[in-house]
Image: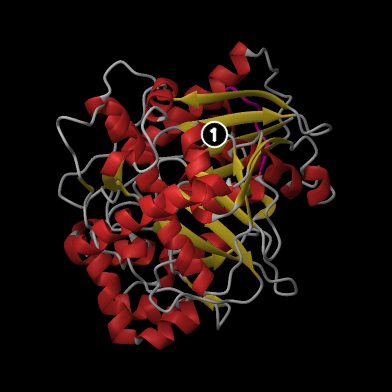
C-alpha cells in the first residue's frame, strides 16, 4: 500500500491506495474544522508548522484505526504541500518562527525592488518570474526585519520539506521546489546565486537537492511511533500542491492542463520550453517530471481568493448552510446574479493583478431585489471570471486551453461553478476521481520503484464526469463577464 499526504493551509488530507490496482483504500482529513491562518497585520498570513505535523499524525491515526490497516502494510510515502511558504529551523531542527505562507503579501515590495535592481530582462530570462512575493523574498524580509531570528537560521525550507524533515530527520528539497521559491536559475541550471547575493543570503541555508521521484529518506523510529507506522518506510516523492495536482490528474505533457479550486484557484498548463509572462502575472516553474533531456515546465495561474471566499460567505452570511446547500441556493439566481459583480481578491496580493493587494469588492446590490442566492452566485461567478482573466494571459503566451482536467472536489463539486467555468473559458472540463493526497501516494510508488513507469501509476484513475460548454448559455455568461470586467477596471 502507498500513503500520500496533501499539506494544505485549510487541512491535511491523507489517502492510502493499493499499488496493484490503484484503488483508494481509505482517506482522511484533519482537522475537521479548517485550520486558522493568523494575520497579525494587513497582508500577512502565517501558520505554525507544528500544527501541520499534528494534523498529519491525526489523519494517519484515523486512516489506520478506522480502516484496520496494519501499520506495516505501507511501503512508501509521498508528500504534497502548500507552495511558496517559508519555514525556518535552527541546527537542532527547531522551528524559529511561524511559517510565512503562500498568501502572505509582506515581501511583495522586496521582490519588486529586486526585479528593478537586477533588471527585469535578467530576472525573466534566468528565473522566468519576478522574485515577487515568493519564498526567497520572504526570507529576505526576515533578514531585514527579524535579524535576531535570521542569525539562528540553519535551513530555510518549504512546507513539504519541513514535513519530510519531521519524518526522516533529513533536510532536503527538489529542483521543482527551488523553482517555486525563486531559488533556481533556469539559464544556469543551478541555485539562483545572483538573487541570493543581492539579498545577502548564503546558499548554505538552502536544503540539499534530491530528485522528485526518489527515496528522499526513511521514516525514523521516533516519527514511526508518532504516526503509528513502522520504521524504515521510504519517503519517495515530494511536490508543491499545484504541480502535484497536475500529476494526480496525469497531466505530464505539453499542452495538457489541470485545474484546482481549493482555498486558491489554479490553472496549471505544461510547456516544453522555459517561457514566461513579461509582467509575471502567471508564473513558470519546473514540473515534477522535468529532466534535462525531456524538459517540462508548469505555467501557473493563481487566484488566491477562491474556496476561501466561499468559506467566508458560509461563516459570515450563510449560517447553518452546508456547502451543498449553498450550491443549490446559488443555482436559483440567474446568470449574472441580477447585476451583482463580485471581485474575489480578498486573500492577499494577487499575481494576475501584478501583486497588488486589492481586497475583495462587490457592486450592484439592491436591497429590494437581491437575496442570499444572488450573493452566492455572484461569488462563484466572480471566482470563475477572475480565473478567466488569467486564462487570457496564458493564451497570450500561446497556450491552448481546450480541455482542462480537475479532481471532483472542492469548488468543482458545485454544478454552478462547473457550468460557469466551462462556458466562460470555452474549455471542456474533465472530472476525475482523485485529489492531491492520492497523487502524492501514486508519486511515492514511482519514486520507490514500486511502479515501473507513470502508466502503471495511474491504474485506477477514472473520469467521473464531463462538463462541456453550452452554446445557448454563451451570451448570458459573456454579458456577465463584461460587466464584471468593467467593475474590475474601475477598481484598478
Q: How is the image coloured?
A: secondary structure
What span is in magenta?
228-235
Q: Which quarter of the figure is the N terminus placed in? A: top right
Please tell me which residue is depicted at 55% across the width and 57% down the height of the picture. 268
Left or right: 424, with 354 as reference point: right
Percent position of residue 280, x then y: 40, 72
Left or right: 440, with 134 as reference point: right
Percent position of residue 445, x then y: 74, 42
Considering depth in this image, is 66 or 215 the residue closer to the camera?
66
Q: Which quarter of the figure is the C terminus placed in? A: bottom left
Write down the quadrant of residue 426 in the picture: bottom right
Considering depth in this image, is 58 or 245 the residue closer to the camera?
245
Mark 1 packing: few (<14 Cα in 10 Å), some, or many (20+)?
some
Percent position of residue 148, x then y: 19, 58
Q: Is residue 85 visible?
A: no
Helix, strand or loop: magenta stretch: loop
Left or right: 157, with 119 as reference point: right
The answer to whether residue 267 is magenta is no
Residue placed under numbered mark 1 in the picture: 409
Amino acid at each position: 500500500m502507498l500513503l500520500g499526504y496533501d499539506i494544505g493551509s485549510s487541512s491535511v488530507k491523507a489517502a492510502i491506495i493499493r499499488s496493484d490496482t490503484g484503488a483508494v483504500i481509505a482517506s482522511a482529513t484533519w482537522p475537521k474544522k479548517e485550520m486558522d491562518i493568523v494575520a497579525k497585520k494587513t497582508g500577512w498570513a502565517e501558520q505554525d508548522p507544528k500544527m501541520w505535523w499534528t494534523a498529519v499524525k491525526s489523519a494517519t491515526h484515523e486512516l489506520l484505526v478506522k480502516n484496520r490497516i496494519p501499520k506495516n502494510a505501507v511501503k512508501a510515502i509521498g508528500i504534497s504541500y502548500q507552495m511558496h511558504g517559508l519555514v525556518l529551523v535552527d541546527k537542532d531542527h527547531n522551528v524559529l518562527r511561524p511559517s510565512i505562507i503562500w498568501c502572505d503579501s509582506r515581501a511583495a515590495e522586496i521582490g519588486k525592488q529586486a526585479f528593478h535592481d537586477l533588471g527585469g530582462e535578467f530576472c525573466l530570462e534566468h528565473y522566468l518570474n519576478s522574485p515577487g512575493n515568493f519564498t526567497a523574498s520572504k526570507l529576505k524580509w526576515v533578514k531585514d526585519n527579524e535579524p535576531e531570528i535570521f542569525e539562528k537560521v540553519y535551513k530555510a525550507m518549504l512546507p513539504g520539506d519541513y514535513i519530510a524533515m519531521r519524518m526522516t530527520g533529513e533536510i532536503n528539497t527538489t529542483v521543482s521546489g527551488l523553482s517555486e521559491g525563486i531559488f533556481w536559475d533556469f539559464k544556469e541550471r543551478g541555485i539562483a546565486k545572483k538573487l541570493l547575493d543581492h539579498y545577502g543570503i548564503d546558499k548554505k541555508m538552502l536544503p540539499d537537492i534530491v530528485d522528485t521521484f526518489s527515496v528522499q529518506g526513511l521514516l525514523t523510529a521516533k516519527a514511526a511511533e508518532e504516526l503509528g507506522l513502522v520504521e524504515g518506510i521510504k519517503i519517495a516523492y515530494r511536490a508543491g500542491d499545484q504541480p502535484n495536482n497536475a500529476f494526480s490528474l496525469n497531466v505530464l505533457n505539453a499542452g495538457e492542463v489541470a485545474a484546482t479550486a481549493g482555498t486558491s484557484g489554479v490553472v496549471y498548463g505544461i510547456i516544453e520550453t522555459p517561457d514566461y509572462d513579461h509582467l509575471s502575472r502567471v508564473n513558470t516553474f519546473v514540473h515534477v517530471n522535468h529532466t534535462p533531456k525531456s524538459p517540462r515546465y508548469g505555467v501557473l495561474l493563481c487566484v488566491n481568493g477562491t474556496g476561501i471566499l466561499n468559506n467566508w460567505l458560509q461563516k459570515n452570511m450563510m449560517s447553518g448552510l452546508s456547502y451543498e446547500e449553498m450550491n443549490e441556493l446559488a443555482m436559483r439566481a440567474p446568470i449574472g446574479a441580477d447585476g451583482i459583480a463580485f471581485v474575489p481578491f480578498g486573500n492577499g496580493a494577487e499575481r494576475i493583478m501584478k501583486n497588488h493587494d486589492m481586497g475583495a469588492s462587490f457592486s450592484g446590490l439592491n436591497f429590494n431585489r437581491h437575496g442570499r442566492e444572488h450573493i452566492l452566485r455572484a461569488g462563484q461567478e466572480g471566482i470563475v471570471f477572475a480565473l478567466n482573466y488569467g486564462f487570457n494571459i496564458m493564451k497570450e503566451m500561446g497556450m491552448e486551453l481546450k480541455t482542462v482536467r480537475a479532481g471532483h472536489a472542492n469548488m468543482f463539486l458545485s454544478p454552478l461553478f462547473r457550468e460557469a467555468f466551462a462556458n466562460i473559458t470555452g474549455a471542456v472540463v474533465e472530472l476525475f476521481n482523485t485529489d492531491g493526497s492520492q497523487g502524492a501516494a501514486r508519486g511515492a510508488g514511482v519514486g520507490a520503484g514500486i511502479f515501473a513507469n507513470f502508466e502503471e501509476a495511474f491504474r485506477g484513475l477514472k473520469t467521473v464526469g464531463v462538463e462541456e460548454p453550452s452554446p445557448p448559455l454563451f451570451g448570458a455568461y459573456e454579458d456577465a463577464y463584461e460587466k464584471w470586467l468593467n467593475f474590475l477596471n474601475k477598481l484598478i
